[in-house]
Image (spheres, helix red, strand yellow):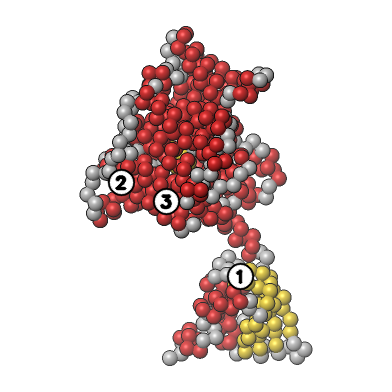
Amino acid sequence: MIKKYFKKDEWFGNIRGDAIAGIVVALALIPEAIAFSIIAGVDPKVGLYASFCIAVVISFFGGRPGMISAATGAMALLMVTLVRDYGLEYLLATTLLTGVLQVIAGYLKLGRFMSFVPRAVVVGFVNALAILIFMAQLPELTNVTWHVYALTLAGLGIIYLFPYIPKIGTMLPSPLVTIVVLTLVVFFMGLDVRTIGDMGQLPDTLPIFLFPNIPLNLETLMIIFPYALSLAVVGLLESLMTSTIVDDLTDTPSDTNRECKGQGVANIASGLMGGMAGCAMIGQSIINVKSGGRGRLSTFLAGVYLLLMVVFLADILTIVPMAALVAVMIMVSIGTFDWGTFKKLKTLPLSTSFVMLATVIVTVATHNLAAGVLSGVLLASLFFANKISHFMYCDTSYSEDNTIKSYKFVGQVFFNSADKFYKIFDFKEVVDKVIIDLTKAHFWDISAVYALDKAVIKLRREGAEVVVVGQNDASATIIDRFGVHDKPQEIKKVMGGH
């Protein structure tokens, strides 16, 4: 068990890169954790404690080394009405239940369902997230003095040009250099710009064990369960999507079912330490990877640095200008967006492009990543079903005396092609016998079986003998189980017998 959760190469294979990347991520986590706390309607320390707990715990139990998990906006939006109507204690209880549901999902191996998410949806998800990350920076760039724009542009210049400086450019991550340089500029020049300190009061104590002080009864469960279920689904969906993206960036695999369990354990820890529920963060994960973070140590240190900074270095932290963090997040937005999308729109099939655009539009319009992904998966499924249904066809032939007609079906028969299957039969043609050959066909669902039953029964009503031949094992199983055309008692009921 220890070896499973503590692989030496995952922890100490990139110590220097992970240690430096953790600092950059911690700095980027602070304003977002505070902002998400404000969105949810709770004290900033709830989001900060959550980010610390989740990052530290997920580093041990998560299935994707180098991925950052903390308090997120997608989760915060789901908590608004709960906090408003019932208060913080119920939020903590919901966070605990969210974690339990996610652990159960991990043991049920629900992570494998990520294979059902098409590539078009992943690209749409990434592009939508890049747009949302950029849009989230706009409030910091509106109704401000020119100093903010100058600092932001200077920050972007440092981020993209610093790596080209010989020797030192490859030693330090440019986002960290940007934050340090702009902070020194603001401090020594005395510029009046918005800083982290303006976001909200930072906690001055370490988190403590805190079990929710609410009645443990069915009524409480009925209140928190719907919220917990929504949080669990959104959290896992966003985490697994982010995991897929980090897999691509690092060219390494991840364990999706372990990630489900890890997210659950992390949320349970967060709830017990006075924090809100969270999940993986694509923006911070990309910052981590681009800053040199690859292993579990970077995630662990990001959480540790975060807590040390807000509790012990608050005076220094409060002077960090928001413009520096805005520059870093704009860099993340630019790096996240798949700029090849525009070229792909001209070459990809129309249905694929439509799924990709729909995912982007729904996600950006609702600010709900789960809604965007689910709508994309649904559309992709519908397009796939429609495409597959076109591959079903039928060859007909007659015996020499024209008394026997054979229907030889080829392709997939399911809900979208069942009606087409039924309409192929000519019920008015007078023949003595009809042979329905399914040797090259496959029946997938009850709709297909119902279409077969309806065709056989109607042909028999017209006086023809009907024989069904050639079913493969899977088709025969579903036809035998749900079909009625070869069951005399059922046929009597259908045809009006007694």
Looking at the image, which is closer to me, 109 or 405?
109
Spatial separation of the CA atoms under disc 3 and disc 2 = 14 Å
Tally of marks: 3
Residue at image x 43%, y 32%?
Answer: 304
Whether pointer 1 and pointer 2 mark residues with C-beta atoms closer than 8 Å, the reply is no
Say what secondary structure mark 3 lies in: helix
Residue 355 percent across, percent down from the top left: 59, 49
Residue 414 percent across, percent down from the top left: 58, 68
Left/right of residue 101 with respect to residue 414 in the rendered view: left
User: Which residue lies under the disc numbered 1?
Assistant: 413
Say what secondary structure mark 2 lies in: helix
Say what secondary structure mark 1 lies in: strand
User: Which residue lies under the disc numbered 2?
Assistant: 93
Residue 455 percent across, percent down from the top left: 58, 79
Q: Eyeballing the image, is 84 above or below 101?
A: above
Whether pointer 3 and pointer 2 mark residues with C-beta atoms closer than 8 Å, the reply is no
